[in-house]
Amino acid sequence: MIKKIVVLSGKGGTGKTTITGALHHLLGNHVLADCDVDASNLHLLTPHKVLETINYVGGNKAKILSEFCIWCGSCENICRFDAVKFDTEKGYFIDPYACEGCKACTYVCTQNCIAIEKNFSGEYYHSQTMEKNAESLDFFHAHLYPGEETSGGLVAEVVNLSMKYGDEKSVPYLLVDGAPGIGCAATSSIVGAYYILIVTEPTESGFHDMKRLIETIHNFHSPFGIVINKWDINPDKTQEIMDFAKKNNYALMGNIPMDEKVVQSTAKGKSIMEEDSPAAHSIREIFSKIQKELKI
Ligand code: SF4
Ligand code: SF4
């Protein structure tokens, strides 16, 4: 079965996607997946061709068929989410952003004029990478529409499809750019992980969010290692994180320095590994440690 390697961070903006893109260049045969569906951008760093687009149904929404409505207001009274609205000209209608699809309104409508419809809340894509001098790999990514909240379900769809394709082709690894934080999208990324690489930054919030993420990972019993990105912007905080890791026996996989070339290559839509730079050098060392740890 394909082994899932997940790159995670306790918060956004730590460089998680840049590091995932770099590992993608080093790992060899693998399936690549972007599970940061709320703010996906791995596809911007990864030249690819979309082969298939799949609609994502994230629950249901109610819709009032106004031609049959007698304006009794029963649906408005029963709705706990304040999703039924009234307009003196249009009559009753549903606010799709407030509706949770619970169907309570359908049980009180004597006119049977409330339909429950599928809510298309995003898309996910099966793509093929198209990088110079590299073998083409399967790449799965997604886009959750603005205002939609079912990111955990969409992450599960992306992971399941990635694993299915990987298993069918006997690909050894699935490399995942996980969702940041500790919400349901992050936990959907973590489930079944063979190995997790935590990316943090040397700030108070980075340290705090990393500790919360580690508490979450403990529930899933996956092995993990820690990388401190831009370690030299705050050497004291870096030392504090390293001391914390040592005290708790957590594996420190390495530190990556602040590097202008990371910003430049990201702006050009390129991986940092396409340039020779201090950050690229550190990432190579981190990858060697991961190889030893995972016996790749
Ligand atoms: S389906 Fe539930 S949330 Fe949506 S309008 Fe009806 S009662 Fe309100
Ligand atoms: S319960 Fe049915 S008939 Fe009454 S206002 Fe709502 S949609 Fe209209």
Image (cartoon, helix red, strand yellow):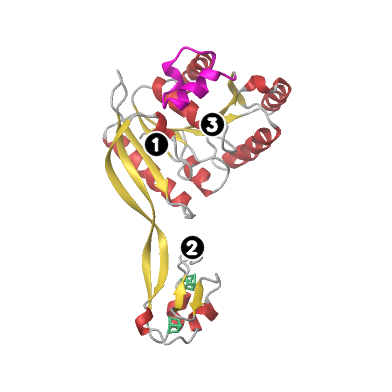
2 vs 1, front mark: 2
- Asked if the residue at label 3 sits under 8 Å from ligand 1, the reply is no
Q: Rounded to the nearest whole Å, what is the CA distance between mark 2 and mark 3?
A: 39 Å
Helix, strand or loop for disc 2: loop
In the rendered image, the vertical position of residue 65 relative to residue 201, given as above or below: below
Residue 261 is inside the magenta segment: yes
**One can see residue 196 in this view:** no
Where disc 3 sits, the SS reads loop
Between residue 241 and residue 266, name the one nearer to us: 266
What amino acid is at disc 2?
Tyr
Residue 249 in percent (x, y) is at: 65, 26
Q: Position of residue 261 (x, y in %)?
A: 51, 18
Amino acid beneath label 1: Ala
Q: Say which residue appears at 47% left-offset and 12% top-offset.
A: 276
Which dot marks residue 187?
none
Q: Tell me residue 117's x, y (percent).
A: 36, 67
The first of marks 2 and 1 along the sequence is 1
Q: Nearer the viewer, residue 65 or 87?
A: 87
Residue 21 appears in which quarter of the rendering? top left
Count all numbered tags in the image, as a single digit.
3
Q: Are marks 2 and 1 in contact (CB under 8 Å)?
A: no
For the point 73% across and 22% down, which residue is it?
Answer: 236
Identify the residue position indicated by label 3 in the image.
223
Q: Earlier in the sequence, mark 2 or mark 3?
A: 2
The residue under label 2 is 97
**Left or right of residue 183: residue 274:** left
Which dot marks residue 33?
1
Tell me: residue 24, above or below residue 74: above
Image quadrant containing the N terminus: top left
State which region is magenta.
258-279
Q: Are dots 3 and 1 in contact, CB under 8 Å? A: no
Residue mark closest to the camera, 3 vs 1: 1
